[in-house]
Image: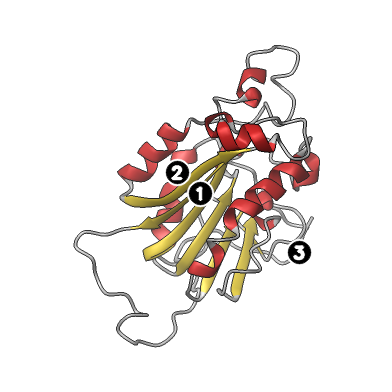
Amino acid sequence: MQTLPPSNTLYLPRSWEEIPRGEAFRAALEQQLQPWWPKMYGYHLLKLGNLSAGIDSEKCPISHQVNVGLCGEGLQVLADPVQLPFAEKSVDACLIAHTLAYARDPHRILREVDRVLIDDGWLVMTNFNLFSLLGVGKLLPWVRHRQPMAAQMFTQMRLLDWLGLLNYEVMYHSRVHVLPWGRQGGKMLSAHLPALGCVGVMVARKRTLPLTPTAKRVGLRKPSLSRAVGAVKSYRDLP
């Protein structure tokens, strides 16, 4: 079997089940995203990484949803996230669920996602919050190398700055699940102290100045999810 070398990733869990309390984190994120999926239209939704593939996006009207990652189950395309095998501006929406948390170069992944997204395309991003009880765990020597404390954590302000530099308009951002060890994450605390939520979610749209017409708006033929010249190969054989 052929696999792609993990050139740009740290240890990447292949599912939410490999992260302690991961199922609870996933459920909290899915609840936050449910109102946003019906707003997204287009032809192609890219779910980048194994954790993204595990997020339920059934309510999204985009029918062609492609799971992309280095290795694991449930992936349609095996590819390095920093060199996606798709042409520029060929993807309508992209989900990167905790993908940056396990990347050696998160900026490069964001730039690659920006390359393949169409103008006004949707970017959905989730992450672990540094200013939370999980973030405190990174200061404790006996737990900081365990999951999920071993993952990279970013402040919400830092992520907003990154998206601002790429000219994205943030439509929604939130943090939930204050108590990481509870199945519900502390609903009362999440309602009154959202800044301390362990997991965060952002929904943004790619903006351009000046705004240029897209193929959908001018009534051209349906675009295809074509491969980019010189991009890495995709494989059907899973390890």
Residue 199 visible in the displayed image: no
203 above or below 184? below
168 above or below 41? above
| Mark 1: amino acid | Val
Q: Is residue 173 left or right of residue 217?
A: right
Comparing labels 3 and 1, the label whose residue is closer to the camera: 1
Sequence-wise, the earlier of marks 2 and 1 is: 1
163 above or below 64? above
CA separation, marks 2 and 1? 6 Å
Sequence-wise, the earlier of marks 3 and 1 is: 1
Q: Residue at x 58, y 55 (%)?
A: 33
Q: Secondary structure at mark 3?
A: loop
Q: Residue at x 35, y 87 (%)?
A: 220
> Front-most of 75 and 62?
62
Identify the residue under disc 3. Answer: 237
Q: Quadrant of the C terminus?
A: bottom right
Q: Secondary structure at mark 1?
A: loop
Task: Pinpoint residue 197: horizontal percent, then vertical percent.
Answer: 59, 33
| Mark 2: amino acid | Arg
Marks 2 and 1 in Cβ contact (< 8 Å): yes
Task: Pinpoint residue 217: horizontal percent, then vertical percent.
Answer: 32, 80
CA separation, marks 3 and 1? 21 Å
Identify the residue under disc 2. Answer: 108
CA separation, marks 3 and 2? 27 Å
> Front-most of 230 and 26?
26
Q: Which mark is residue 82?
A: 1
Sequence-wise, the earlier of marks 3 and 2 is: 2
